[in-house]
Amino acid sequence: MKIGNGMRAAGSVFLLALLLTSGGCGYKTDPVPPASVVPTAIDDLRYTIDEAGLKLTWTYPSETVKGTDLMDISAFDLYRAVIPLSDLCETCPIPFGEPLEIPGGVTTDANKKRVAEYRTSLLRSGHKYYFKVRSRTSWWADSADSNIVSFVWHVPTSAPSGLTIEPADSRITLNWLAVTSLIDGRAADGAVSYQVFRSEGGKDFKAAGDPVTSNNFTDDQVTNGKKYFYKVQSLLSYEGNLVNGGVSDVVSATAVDKTPPAKVSGVTAVETKSGIRIFWDPAKDSQVAAYRVYRRAEGQKTAELLGEVSASYTLFVDNNAPAGTRVYYSVTALDQAVPANESAPSAEAAPK
């Protein structure tokens, strides 16, 4: 019996030693998720602000940090910090609070990356806001922080009104009424400027240049024949920050080519048995699409149109010239614009 008790005691000591050396059944630290399930960090967190409040957007990550495809996001954690301007410390750590959980889902829709969105109108005037977001595939596998966006919120200025648009050759000009008040009716308590946004399809507007202080804007980065959409947002200068205000209605226009081709040169008229043949030099402008031939009888003030030929021809035959009357011919060039621009008439030529 003594021997048996000794063996049991020795076995207990051995088991305790084994448990101590093996670390037991628990974890000493939090589990580290494998790289195959950790999403890449979001790098396109963006915001827009208008009189309705804030909208944040970002693209669903579609890969893990390991480079493998990611089909689903469990949720997003949205972090926010709010600091009164009187307490703002630009060199201090940003005091982000506990995150707001936003539902995730599949990362693509119809083979396109999905875009997440968050809206709120609960903003406090005179405060600076900071936001960042993380994505996760489970409670223990989350991404690194996204880029941080920040802005100052103040009662916004009213939206620009009376927006008009004037298309021209290779440019489009916008005009609007100056904004002088906030959305609550009070006079604007700072300088007001304007940001023009442009789109080529009516969606995905992007800033067209830097903000302007005047209530007009000319966009000369346009292509004739293409339709463009515009909207204008007012901006208020407040405590050294630009605060986004109201956004105007959307207007659209198409830049129109209104520049005529150069004059036609080398016009010559020769009388033949088959009629009067009119020749001219071919245009050097590749945009010329056709020519028009005019005839003016002696004593007439205005020339009459005889006909039109394509740009591949530089000859026209007048088979119906009035007999016994001296006539004069001129030629113009037409470009490819719709409607076409017509050049000034060439120098007149009388038949030889």
Image (cartoon, rainbow, N blue to C red):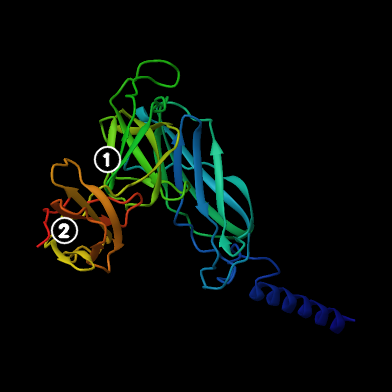
Which residue: 29% across, 50% down?
257
Residue type pointed to by label 1: Thr
The disc at residue 321 is none
At horizontal 44% and vertical 21% (from top left) the residue drawn is 183
* First-in-chain label (1 vs 2): 1
Q: Residue 178 appears at what percent x and percent y?
A: 32, 24
Q: Position of residue 51 (x, y in %)?
A: 47, 29
Quadrant (top left, top right, bottom left, bottom right) of the C terminus? bottom left
The structure residue drawn at horizontal position 59% and vertical position 58%, both measured from the top left corner, is 136
Q: Position of residue 92 (x, y in %)?
A: 35, 42
Q: Nearer the viewer, residue 234 or 100?
A: 234
Tell me the residue that label 2 is attached to. 264
Number of marks in the image?
Answer: 2
On the picture, is 187 further left or further right than 109? left
Disc 1 residue crowd, few under 14, some 14–19, many 20+, Cα 10 Å: some
Q: What kind of element bears circle 2?
A: loop
Q: Residue furthest bottom?
A: 3
Q: Residue type at mark 2? A: Val
Q: Which mark is residue 218?
A: 1
